[in-house]
Image (cartoon, helix red, strand yellow):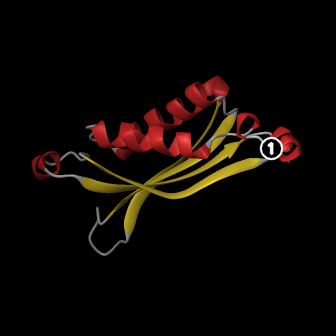
């Protein structure tokens, strides 16, 4: 089973939604990522250069989400998955993106994508 690097509960605020009122406000987006990464080199060397820099992944995604203006969470999730796969050398990932409070009586709505480098 391959190693995984996790980022859970990454929060950023974005302009997202199809309704006019949603285009005028910023709403929270919550991301969970499970990224396939061989952790053995970093485990042996104890050097960041040999690890997946999850702080850099979080910074890049936060900046992207906060400047984005998608209508659909599916489109935002797809764009975020491409960034991780193409810019950070991750071979595959499972990305869950949630939009809290989007539907009455639900804590959040969301999508989960599973992508690998060949699908990016």
Res 113 quadrant in image: top right
Point 26% across, 55% down: residue: 27
Q: Locate residue 62 relative to residue 49 in the image: left or right.
A: left
Q: Nearer the viewer, residue 84 or 116?
A: 84
Residue 117, given in percent of the width and then of the height, sits at 65, 27
Point 61% across, 26% down: residue: 119
Element carrying mark 1: loop
Residue 51, given in percent of the width and then of the height, sits at 73, 40
Residue 6, given in percent of the width and then of the height, sits at 64, 53
Query: Which residue extends farthest right?
Result: 44
Q: Nearer the viewer, residue 109 or 10?
A: 10
- Above or below residue 38? Residue 112 is below
- Above or below residue 59? Residue 29 is below
Question: Which residue is identified by label 1?
Answer: 39
Q: Residues within 10 Å of mark 1 (few under 14, many from 20)?
A: some
Residue 53, given in percent of the width and then of the height, sits at 63, 41
Q: Locate residue 32 relative to residue 73 in the image: left or right.
A: right
Does residue 8 appear anywhere in the picture?
yes
Does residue 120 appear anywhere in the picture?
no
Res 8 quadrant in image: bottom right
Q: Locate residue 112 relative to residue 12 in the image: left or right.
A: right
Point 46% across, 37% down: residue: 60
Q: Locate residue 98 relative to residue 55 in the image: left or right.
A: left
- Above or below residue 100? Residue 42 is above
Which quadrant: the C terminus?
top right
Point 68% across, 39% down: residue: 52
Query: Which residue extends farthest bottom?
Result: 105
Number of residue marks: 1
Q: Nearer the viewer, residue 17 or 35?
A: 35
């Amino acid at each position: 089973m391959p190693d995984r690097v996790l980022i859970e509960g990454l929060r950023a605020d974005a302009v997202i939604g199809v309704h006019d009122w949603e285009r005028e406000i910023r709403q929270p987006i919550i991301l969970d990522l499970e990224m396939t990464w061989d952790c053995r080199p970093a485990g042996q060397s104890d050097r960041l250069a040999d690890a997946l820099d999850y702080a850099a992944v979080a910074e890049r995604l936060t900046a992207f989400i906060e400047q984005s203006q998608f209508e659909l969470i599916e489109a935002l999730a797809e764009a975020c998955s491409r960034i991780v796969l193409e810019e950070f050398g991750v071979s595959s990932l499972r990305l869950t993106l949630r939009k809290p409070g989007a539907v009455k009586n639900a804590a959040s709505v969301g999508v989960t994508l599973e992508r690998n480098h060949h699908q990016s």
